[in-house]
Amino acid sequence: MTSIASALPRRVWLPLILAAGVGSSLWVRMHNAVHYPLDWGFDAKYNWRYIIALSRQWHLPAPDAGWATADPPLYFALSALLVRLAPERLMWVAALNLVLGFAIAALAVGLVRRIAPEAPNRAWLAGGLVLFLPAHVMMSAMINEEMLTAAGVSTLLFLVAHPARRDEATPPAVRRGAFAGLAGGLAWFSKFTAAIGIAVAALALADDARRRKSPGLGLRVLAAFALCVMLAGGWFYLRNIFVYGYLQPYGLPAHQLMFEMPPGTRGLLDYLRFPLATFSDPQLLNPELLRSVWGSLYASVWFDAHRSFLPTESEAVRQLGSLTLVLALLPTAAFAVGLVRALPRAWRGDPVDGPLVALTGLTFVGFAYYTWRNPWFAVIKGTSLLSLCLPYAVYASESLTRWGRRPAAAAGLAMVLLALAGCVVVSGTFDGWFVRDEVSGLPWRSVEAR
């Protein structure tokens, strides 16, 4: 590989690699948009019912009217609009997440270009890291609001994590705050968890007001941000409070089925275990993974641990999962190292690292709390962390670029990443190399909750 790269000019081999990467990723997503059943995947059956109901009768139902009706309605409303506009082309609904997924990758490229203009290859690497993230690939095919939420939070982060943010004059600074608020509000109007991104952005803008020579300008930016957040999405939660008495419902009758799922309880050790089964048998009903929050999360970020795409009983699938999860240790370690290196910069108030690190930390804390309060295997999904696509792309690409300064090291890293990308293409192509005949998901009723 090194000899080929040295024999060809960079202007020849780099576009070829980029075209192959983008093309293969696009092909997988387009194939899945056509072939993946609309009612398969995480909550997709209930989400699809909600979408069809909205397409026929344009009004918000009560939160307890169905499984998905308790969720903010933006994604379902957009999908219902697509159904109305083209009822004979329902794949357009599936293609919505495809487009949003590529938008997130483009934001990752743009953010890394902004903070490291001297390293253009790092920006393209950042985009590739997002496009070949298995959780990102799978969610591009599912009827689910996670991708829309991630796109909104990523746009918010792209606008706020700007090196020159604190030096802007009044009109552009207020515009930035307003557009960031609009992106955050729309993400919140798609899923409640976007509140973490909104809180991070608000803290960053409040810190700007403290650091600026003109605190009044910082307060105007913060006010524009807050106003747009409320106009774009916050009104929905105010409505919930006045009409139903809560921001976000919990334990509705429609969700009682989850109470039967394993393991049924969580203990402190569940957050300390990282078993070998994470690599040897990456499916979440494995008894060891049932008792490992972070092992289950890692398996579901990098592989189809819920078996939404792949056959449940297949030795070849298990081996593919093991290989994928071992290879994925490289970008995961790169992200962790980059994040740790960014901590001192964030502590000093860096305008880029501050929001990126804060969003990452608060998201993991929120995820830990959520899994403690909801002790069922089905809630541990790597797709729940898609709002971290930009921090992952920034810090993993930073470490990988630094580690690959020597040609021999760069060639080794490239071989691992290309092998990982190949595994993702194989595992992420529905009814491609593996055919799934049974219903989507794991047979959890065979495992007792305890």
Image (cartoon, grey):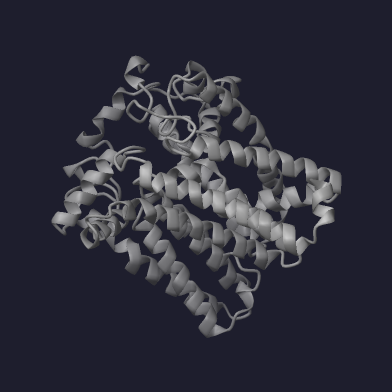
Name the residue located 29 percent from the left edge and 56 percent from the top edge: 79
Left or right of 120? Residue 206 is left
Find residue 330 and report its horizontal and vertical position in percent: 69, 38
Above or below, 147 against 290 in this view is below
Residue 110 lies in quadrant: bottom right
Name the residue located 34 percent from the left edge and 58 percent from the top edge: 189
Name the residue located 49 percent from the left edge and 49 percent from the top edge: 27
Above or below, 275 against 171 in this view is above
Find residue 339 and report its horizontal and vertical position in percent: 67, 48
Q: Is residue 60 visible?
A: no
Looking at this view, is 233 or 38 the one in front? 38
Tell me how many marks there are: 0
- Quadrant for the N terminus, please: top right
Residue 37 lies in quadrant: top left
Name the residue located 50 percent from the left edge and 52 percent from the top edge: 26
Left or right of 236? Residue 117 is right
Find residue 71 and report its horizontal and vertical position in percent: 29, 48
Left or right of 94? Residue 58 is left
Residue occupying the far left of the picture = 57
Q: Is residue 96 visible?
A: yes
Find residue 92 and report its horizontal and vertical position in percent: 33, 55
- Quadrant for the C terminus, please: top left
Looking at this view, is 162 or 86 the one in front? 86
Above or below, 127 against 65 in this view is below
Looking at this view, is 52 or 277 the one in front? 52
